Amino acid sequence: MTLLIQLIYTSRVSSDFREHEIPELLKKSRPANAKLQITGMLFYLGTAFLQVLEGEGHSVDSVFARILVDKRHTQVMTISREPIDERSFPNWTMDFATIDPVEAGEIIGDPGSFTDGAQVRLDSRSTNRLIAAFRRPKWEQSSAPLAAPTARRTK
Ligand SMILES: Cc1cc2nc3c(=O)[nH]c(=O)nc-3n(C[C@H](O)[C@H](O)[C@H](O)COP(=O)(O)O)c2cc1C
């Protein structure tokens, strides 16, 4: 049996990076991830990226090593790196969503976390909240205590 791990990190979007560059980033990343059997999700929050990478440990670590030195973002901060029993995004070589930064802050209960200052303020608990809020199926959202995020998914 292969040992799967899930790595979550946040980073600050470089000042010269523009949202319209994301399709190109995904176009290159997805086939590379497919080759390494990496799945996951990338969130773009205007000032911050949040990414979930899952797969075999050495594969995830090798992709993350490249991501770490990528000039399109700075202040890369690992939130967690843990063994997992199953993938959270099994069908995605890299799912993608844009989330409004104000809304993301509300979901994690820290309104300023993506809109002010130079530092992205996220810990493991709030990151998982954000991911869970986004992944919650539509039928659950109406009765959920948290506001449903209005994320845009781009295929
Ligand atoms: C926010 C962000 C997320 C990225 N995600 C991935 C990814 O999931 N897979 C991938 O292969 N490259 C990803 N990249 C691109 C890598 O950083 C790197 O440019 C790419 O792997 C090519 O590396 P190379 O030029 O050393 O071959 C990402 C870059 C950024 C800025």
Image: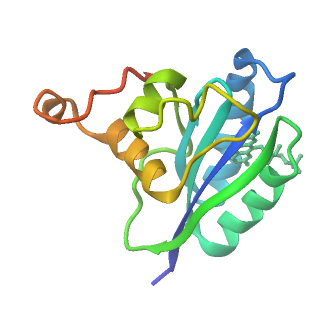
Ligand 1, image quadrant it occupies = top right
Q: Quadrant of the N terminus?
A: bottom left
Which quarter of the picture shows residue 49?
top right
Identify which residue, 140 or 37, lies in the foreground.
140
- Outermost top residue: 20
Q: Position of residue 109 (x, y in %)?
A: 40, 38
Instruction: Name the residue nearer the viewer: 118 or 96.
Output: 118
Question: For residue 29, which quarter of the picture?
Answer: top right
Q: Is residue 141 above or below residue 79?
A: above
Residue at point 52%, 72% (across, down):
82
Residue 34 visible in rendering:
yes
Establish if 37 lies above or below 22.
below
Tell me where residue 12 appears, x and y as whole percent.
73, 38
**Image location of residue 152, percent across then percent down:** 45, 20
Q: What residue is at 38 percent from the left and 67 percent from the top?
A: 86
Give the residue at x 88% y 51%: 69
Q: Nearer the viewer, residue 111 or 97?
A: 111
Residue at image location 38% in from the left, 34% down from the top: 107
Q: Is residue 95 left or right of residue 139?
A: right
Horizontal side, residue 12 vs residue 100: left or right: right
Is residue 153 in sight in this rendering? no
- Residue ranking furthest to the bottom: 1
Q: Position of residue 155 (x, y in %)?
A: 50, 25
Residue at the farthest left position: 143
Number of marks in the rendered image: 0
